[in-house]
Amino acid sequence: MQKSDCRLTNALGVVAIDDKLGKTTFAEQLARLQRHKKKKKKFAHPGLQRDKLFRAGYHHKGGSASKRAECCDQGELVERPQRTEEGQQTLVFHRGRIAMGNAVVKDGELRDRIGARCGALRVQMEAAGVDANRR
């Protein structure tokens, strides 16, 4: 497994420490990024209406991601506690191993097996750019 880029790891550490010490909150840092026109879309929250979690064993229908969400069986959604207004505004750091690859893993059960085998919090293709070899 590749090591993460130390610049990213160090930057996240500084942001987390500043947040703990009350110097600058992560929410303030995020708001600063969102004020820039070029970065706004990249760092914007997609909205709770798009935050859907399907059970791992459910096999999704084909098509683009936006159409797939519409045609998937809503009965397969995992029920999660409703977020409070305060909870919606709270940001949480999850630090740990991310399993990355060169293909999207569409099978939830396979994703969970890969994550368990690697001790990863997450399996994601997009994270492939966060490695020490990209300098």
Image (cartoon, rainbow, N blue to C red):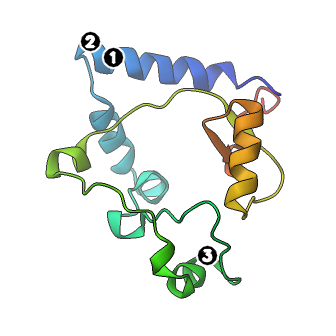
Furthest toward the left, the residue is 85
Task: Report the number of numbered marks.
Answer: 3
Give the quadrant of the C terminus: top right
The residue carrying pointer 2 sits among few (fewer than 14), some (14 to 19) or many (20 or more) residues within 10 Å by Cα, namely few
For disc 2, the marked residue is 21
Circle 3 packing at 10 Å, graded few (<14), some (14-19), many (20+), is: few
In the foreground, 135 or 128:
128
The residue carrying mark 3 is 65
Q: Which one is nearer the viewer's eye here, 133 or 56?
A: 56
The residue drawn where x is 46% and y is 69% is 77
Q: Verify CB contact (< 8 Å) between mark 1 and mark 2.
A: yes
> Element at badge 2?
helix
Q: In which quarter of the image is residue 31?
A: top left
Q: How far apart are marks 3 and 1 (CA)?
A: 36 Å
User: In the rendered image, is residue 39 in sight?
Assistant: yes
Q: Position of residue 16 (x, y in %)?
A: 40, 21
Position of residue 23 measured from the top left corner of the image (x, y, whole percent): 25, 17
Say which quarter of the image contains residue 122.
top right
What amino acid type should be assigned to the residue bearing mark 1? Answer: Asp
Residue at position x 61%, y 75% in the image: 65
Q: Is mark 1 on a helix, strand or loop?
A: helix
